[in-house]
């Protein structure tokens, strides 16, 4: 589903690469934790998958397409196959829960009747049924993140990218979010999650890819957060 | 869904930056009024040329008894000299430019002079001998005045050659300068309009960065993201253009037709029909302005 072949990303000419010759293969339906200190290259990895950045060297394949040769007008089409969740939720504060989720479908031109049936479904999946009319400000952090996940997943993308989705949440709430992501993963969605949260990684026992200084230092199935433990 | 969504986005954008929107409308209104005024002045010049140039004559004033011109050293023009001048006008390189030659005698000149200045006391001291007999030449093509002037000027018996066109050209010079002034002001105002629209679109884009960021992430097309901003600029600019057309129409109708038209009746004036001629131009300019501004701004602020 996602394949990196010797991918290097250098932001400013002459500086240390943010990602250094990374080779990685993520299969369809996998759940992968991307761990490492800040500045280790986790965000760069996600940005390359989204084609917010282009690789300086090497090849990035996402959903069967080589992103280096993908023309920019096809990028929106690529991104419709990728849901994205962030630490800071990125919800629209003046829209209701329903409108926030519907927004993702409106802007890719989905018809109204499709939106009216799909949005309640996905809100049911993330456990927010009955809160459609609330504004994000009236929700807890965990609930806001559920809205963000609903928005990322409403289009049923084959890939879900999560950039520290539990970074702003307490452990109990984080666990709920992880259960939700696990459930989404089991529907066949490939999930790549960048995180600092060692408890969660240790608990979930999924594949762990560790980056350090832009290099991939570990790729372990059913791994834990720290390699020395 | 798409259309309704885009329209609501535009509405939000225009309302959120209401004061900026109004200033865009006003600046395009003023700048396009100047553009339109320049256009109308040129149309006015065209109208006057059409009407006046047809009547323009070249007058060859022949020597009277007393004249200080060197070509008039021999006193009153002689028949031989006159025949010479007529022969020059009949030459093959000159003749095609001439439609008609009319000879005005001193007596005829005196009569029309007295007629024209009958109320002036000094007209009574002028005698027939003071008048010039003249050849009045109507040209087939008024612009080829110099062809005629070149062959006759300086010939013995010719005092001066006068082209009425030169008198009108003074008027046109003034009008052309006015056009330049209007066009110059229009250029400055258009620049201000472009900058203002650019700023407005940028503000609008910045204030909706969150939305556009999400749009990008969920795979909205670039056009879909940018269209509301482009249309916002275009709508504001078009409203400005419509106001400019209304202003010009009002100006032509009230100032030119009713006021100037009533006091200076011998000039053909532009009418509201000419305003409708420049109106599409103004709207096109407005849309171009907004288009250029959007392309410049949006490529930078809503990049995919």
Image (spheres, rainbow, N blue to C red):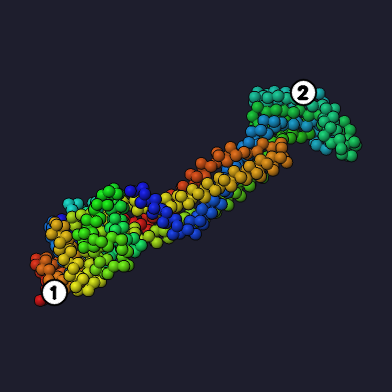
Query: Does residue B50 appear to the left or right of B130 in the view shown?
Result: left
In the shown orientation, is residue A30 left or right of residue A141?
A: left
Density class for disc 1 (Cα within 10 Å; few <14, some 14-19, many ≥20) is: few
Residue, x 74% and y 31% (percent of image)?
Answer: B59
In the figure, A28 relative to B102: above or below? below
Helix, strand or loop under label 1: loop
What residue is shown with label 2?
Answer: B83
Where is residue B87 shown, x and y percent of the image? 72, 23
Q: Name the residue tied to disc 1.
A: A226
Task: Establish if B262 lies above or below B112.
Answer: below
Residue at 80% x, 36% y is B70
Counting from the top left corner in percent of width and height, residue B24 is at 50, 55
At a point 45% along the width and 57% down the height, the residue shown is: B15
Q: Where is residue A40 in the image (x, y as percent from the top left)?
A: 21, 70
Q: Which of B221 and B155 is in front in this view?
A: B221
Left or right? Give the position of A203 relative to B293. left
What x and y, as percent, mark residue A98?
Answer: 29, 58
Label 1 marks a residue whose chain is A
- Which quadrant is the N terminus of chain A positioned in? bottom left
Foreground tag (1 vs 2) = 1
Taking depth in this image into account, of B103 and A164 the one nearest to the observer is: A164
Quarter occupied by residue A207? bottom left
């Amino acid at each position: 589903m996602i394949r990196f072949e010797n991918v290097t990303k250098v932001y400013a000419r002459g500086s240390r690469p943010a990602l250094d010759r990374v080779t990685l293969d993520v299969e369809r339906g996998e759940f992968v934790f991307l761990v490492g200190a800040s500045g280790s290259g986790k965000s760069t990895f996600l940005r390359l998958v989204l084609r917010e950045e282009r690789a300086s060297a090497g090849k990035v394949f996402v959903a069967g397409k080589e992103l280096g040769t993908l023309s920019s007008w096809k990028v929106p089409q690529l991104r419709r196959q990728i849901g994205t969740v962030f630490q800071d939720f990125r919800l629209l504060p003046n829209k209701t829960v329903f409108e926030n989720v519907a927004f993702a479908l409106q802007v890719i031109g989905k018809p109204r009747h499709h939106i009216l049936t799909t949005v309640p479904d996905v809100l049911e999946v993330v456990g927010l049924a009955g809160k459609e009319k609330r504004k994000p400000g009236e929700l807890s952090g965990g609930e806001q993140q559920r809205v963000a996940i609903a928005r990322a997943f409403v289009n049923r993308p084959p890939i879900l990218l999560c950039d520290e989705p539990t970074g702003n949440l307490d452990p109990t709430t984080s666990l709920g979010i992880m259960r939700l992501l696990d459930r989404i993963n089991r529907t066949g969605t490939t999930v790549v999650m960048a995180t600092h949260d060692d408890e969660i990684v240790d608990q979930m026992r999924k594949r762990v890819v560790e980056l350090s200084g832009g290099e991939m230092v570990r790729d372990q199935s059913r791994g834990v957060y720290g390699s020395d433990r | 869904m798409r259309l309704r969504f885009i329209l609501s986005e535009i509405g939000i954008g225009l309302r959120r930056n209401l004061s900026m929107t109004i200033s865009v409308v006003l600046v395009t209104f003023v700048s396009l009024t100047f553009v339109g005024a320049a256009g109308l002045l040129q149309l006015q010049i065209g109208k006057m040329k059409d009407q006046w140039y047809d009547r323009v004559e070249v007058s060859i004033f022949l020597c009277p008894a007393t004249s200080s011109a060197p070509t008039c050293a021999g006193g009153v023009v002689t028949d031989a000299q006159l025949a010479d001048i007529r022969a020059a006008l009949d030459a093959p390189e000159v003749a095609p430019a001439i439609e008609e030659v009319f000879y005005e005698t001193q007596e005829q000149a005196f009569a029309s002079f007295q007629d024209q200045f009958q109320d002036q006391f000094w007209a009574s001291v002028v005698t027939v001998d003071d008048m010039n007999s003249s050849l009045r030449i109507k040209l087939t093509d008024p612009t080829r005045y110099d062809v005629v002037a070149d062959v006759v000027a300086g010939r013995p018996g010719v005092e001066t050659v006068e082209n009425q066109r030169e008198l009108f050209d003074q008027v046109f010079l003034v009008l052309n300068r006015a056009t330049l002034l209007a066009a110059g002001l229009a250029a400055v105002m258009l620049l201000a309009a472009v900058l203002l629209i650019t700023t407005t679109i940028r503000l609008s884009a910045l204030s909706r960065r969150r939305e556009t960021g999400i749009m990008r992430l969920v795979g909205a097309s670039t056009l879909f993201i940018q269209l509301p901003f482009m249309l916002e600029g275009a709508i504001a600019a078009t409203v400005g253009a419509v106001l400019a057309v209304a202003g010009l129409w009002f100006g032509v109708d009230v100032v030119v037709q009713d006021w100037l038209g009533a006091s200076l009746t011998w000039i053909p004036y532009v009418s509201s029909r000419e305003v409708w001629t420049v109106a599409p131009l103004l709207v096109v300019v407005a849309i171009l302005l907004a288009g250029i501004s959007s392309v410049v701004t949006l490529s930078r602020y809503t990049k995919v």
